[in-house]
Image (cartoon, grey):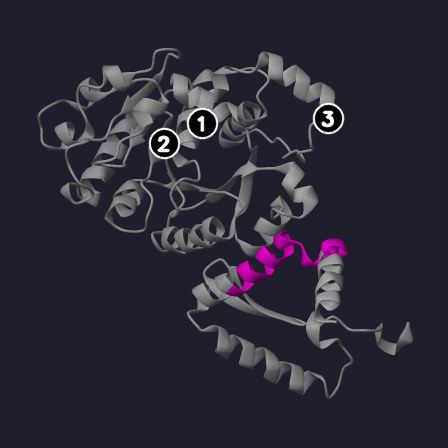
């Protein structure tokens, strides 16, 4: 049974474009570079993301796994950018 | 007064020296007076990539120690007029030179040359700091892999702190085929993580090895995509507005054509 699951997982992995190594590289880079720039560790960044999700989930609908919190460099300052893609258009428009 | 540009990357092996040699040659082929400076004291390579190793008599260390005048230490290129190399000493270490000495060499060179390209050693320590000391601008070379991109971001922060700007990104060794298969980050992905302006994308090209074997910079080769990419970067450096093309995979016929015209 577990070997069947293994095979299915491999097939799924082979066909699932979301799991390409370049996508993994890009996601890892975003986290690594954010940590480097802000000099904070992964747990702190992750905790911040979780807290933001908890607060915003009270008011908006979004998929947890689509949220991305990062720090971007704008000239001499850093900007905290939080992406919370809304699951449906506001006001149903 | 010419421009002093440091070519750097943080990580080693991403193509700093190849980029310096090709951009220096390309800029002089476009009619500029160019000096390329090897700042990798103790591990010199630029002379070999340029095919000038047998002509090196004096190095920047001899100039600093007063054993030789700056003009006399410059090695003239074999193929292009107006292109000179200042070699690095092989016997000294990166700690034998001070940032102010490097700054003085760069500023004196910029009186006579339109472009002074300084090939930085890998790392973020003294060698890099010396290389960047006299620069007004920076070219950051990276390859599409996680560690090189991370180091490029680190070096960007250090150069910004040294108030060197503009800083431009050269994305080297991109393989369009691997990007399509999802096994390499794309040009767009790299730009979404780094806060840099892209000045050019150099596609992966096996011709680079052959050109280094012979000591002839790739820009002398026709029909090489990487050579054309370096020529375009050189033109952008002198202010031409040239769009950055999307690299496509080669089809059968164009790869066949390239096979016949490639340097062996």
Q: Name the residue under label 1.
A: B23
Which mark sits nearer the N-terminus, 1 or 2? Answer: 1
Chain of residue at mark 2 = B
Q: Identify the residue at horizontal 25%, vertical 26% (top origin).
A: B87
Q: Do labels 1 and 2 share a chain?
A: yes
Which image quarter: residue A47?
bottom right
Note whether B3 is above or below B52 in the view shown: below
Crowding at mark 1 (Cα within 10 Å: few <14, some 14-19, many 20+): many
Residue B204 place in picture, x, y as percent: 55, 33
Residue positioned most to the right: A93
Would you say B54 lies left or right of B162 here? Answer: left
Which mark sits nearer the N-terminus, 3 or 2? Answer: 2
Front residue of this view, candidates B109 and B77? B77
Q: Name the residue under label 3.
A: B251
- Magenta stretch containing residue A27, yes or no? yes
Chain of residue at mark 1 = B
Q: Identify the residue at horizontal 71%, vertical 66% (top origin).
A: A3
Look at the magenta stretch and give its main secondary structure.
helix
Crowding at mark 3 (Cα within 10 Å: few <14, some 14-19, many 20+): few
Image depth: mark 3 or mark 1 in front: 3
Q: Give the range drawn in magenta.
A: A14-31
Q: Distance between the residues labelled 1 and 2?
A: 9 Å
Which image quarter: residue B71?
top left
Would you say B161 lies left or right of A51 here? Answer: left
**Answer yes or no: do the residues labelled 1 and 2 have beta carbons within 8 Å?**
yes
Q: Identify the residue at horizontal 20%, vertical 42% (top origin).
A: B94
Quadrant where the image shows the N terminus of chain A: bottom right
Q: Identify the residue at horizontal 57%, vertical 24% (top origin).
A: B228
Q: Mark 2 points at which residue?
A: B117
Quadrant where the image shows the C terminus of chain A: bottom right
């Amino acid at each position: 049974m577990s070997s069947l699951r293994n095979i299915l997982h491999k097939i799924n992995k082979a066909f699932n474009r979301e799991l390409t190594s370049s996508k993994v590289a890009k996601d890892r880079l975003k986290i690594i570079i954010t940590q480097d720039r802000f000099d904070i560790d992964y747990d702190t960044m992750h905790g911040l993301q979780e807290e933001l999700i908890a607060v915003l989930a009270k008011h908006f609908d979004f998929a947890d796994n689509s949220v991305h919190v990062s720090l971007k460099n704008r000239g001499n300052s850093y900007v905290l950018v939080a992406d919370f893609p809304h699951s449906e258009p506001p006001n149903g428009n | 007064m010419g421009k002093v540009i440091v070519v750097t990357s943080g990580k080693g092996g991403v193509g700093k020296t190849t980029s310096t040699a090709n951009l220096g040659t390309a800029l002089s082929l476009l009619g500029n007076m160019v000096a390329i400076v090897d700042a990798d004291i103790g591990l010199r390579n630029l002379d070999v990539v340029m095919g000038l190793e047998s002509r090196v008599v004096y190095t920047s260390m001899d100039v600093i120690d007063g054993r030789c005048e700056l003009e006399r230490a410059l090695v003239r290129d074999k193929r292009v007029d107006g292109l000179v190399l200042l070699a690095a000493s092989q016997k000294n270490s990166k700690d034998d030179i001070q940032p102010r000495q490097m700054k003085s060499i760069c500023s004196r060179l910029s009186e006579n040359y339109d472009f002074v390209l300084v090939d930085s050693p890998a790392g973020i320590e003294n060698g890099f700091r010396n290389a960047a000391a006299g620069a007004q601008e920076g070219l950051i070379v990276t390859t599409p892999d996680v560690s090189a991109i991370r180091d490029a971001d680190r070096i960007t922060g250090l150069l910004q702190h040294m108030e060197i700007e503009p800083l431009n990104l050269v994305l080297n060794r991109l393989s369009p085929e691997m990007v399509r298969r999802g096994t390499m980050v794309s040009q767009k992905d790299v730009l979404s993580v780094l806060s840099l302006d892209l000045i050019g994308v150099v596609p992966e090209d096996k011709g680079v090895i052959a050109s280094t074997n012979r000591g002839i910079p790739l820009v002398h080769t026709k029909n090489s995509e990487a050579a054309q990419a370096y020529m375009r970067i050189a033109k952008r450096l002198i202010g031409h507005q040239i769009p950055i093309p999307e690299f496509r995979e080669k089809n059968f016929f164009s790869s066949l054509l390239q096979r016949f015209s490639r340097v062996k």
